[in-house]
Image (tube, grey):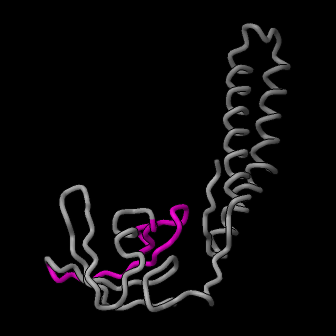
Amino acid sequence: MSTVSYYTAEGLKKLKDELDQLKSIERPKASQAIAEARDKGDLSENAEYDAAKEAQGLLEMRIAKMEELYANARLIDESQLDLSKALVLSKVKIKNQANGMEMKYTLVAESEADLKSGKISVTSPIGKGLLGKKVGEIAEISVPNGKLNFEILEITRD
């Protein structure tokens, strides 16, 4: 069972580039490593050959997983997003009700999440809690150490 994942144009390009890298560069390298190990003699006692075959198997599994991800990837049309509530690709400015601290996050698909650049996954506890909320609403979010309350201050697309 495969699930559909939503991507920005940037995220989809990154996924495609990584898949192309694996297929066009890493796969031939793995084949070359196997060929070199095979040329070293008796395969029954050749640990280098066994290691190269195992690495190739892992690479092929990774390629298959990425191909499935790419096949089920959907591009998000940013022009059709509703700015009245927090959705994927919304930039949400929130205020922690406990300490008054304000933060700004972009809600993205799990594969594009990067906290350092302010992108949080819609599948994370905070992301889930913000989805569907409107400006002025309070999002009560359950996190491992309790509950957090965030006031939605602003929702933008840019």
Query: Residue at the location (39% across, 70% down)?
Result: 127
Seen from this angle, which residue lies furthest left? 98
Is 114 displayed left or right of 152 in the figure?
right
**Above or below, 53 relative to 119:** above
Q: Quadrant of residue 122?
A: bottom left
Q: Position of residue 129 (x, y in %)?
A: 34, 71
Q: In the image shown, does 133 or 15 lie closer to the viewer?
A: 133
Query: Residue at the location (30% across, 83% down)?
Result: 94
**Above or below, 94 relative to 11:** below
Q: Position of residue 132 (x, y in %)?
A: 41, 79
Magenta span has 106? yes
Q: Position of residue 105 (x, y in %)?
A: 40, 78
Q: How many numbered discs? A: 0
**Above or below, 107 relative to 91:** above
Is 2 displayed left or right of 24 in the figure?
left
Is 151 displayed left or right of 112 in the figure?
left
Query: Residue at the location (45% across, 72% down)?
Result: 119
Q: Which stretch did the figure color magenta?
A: 99-122
Query: Residue at the location (55% across, 61% down)?
Result: 111
Q: Quadrant of residue 31?
A: top right
Magenta span has 97? no
Q: Position of residue 16 (x, y in %)?
A: 73, 62
Q: In the image shown, does 13 or 80 lie closer to the viewer?
A: 80
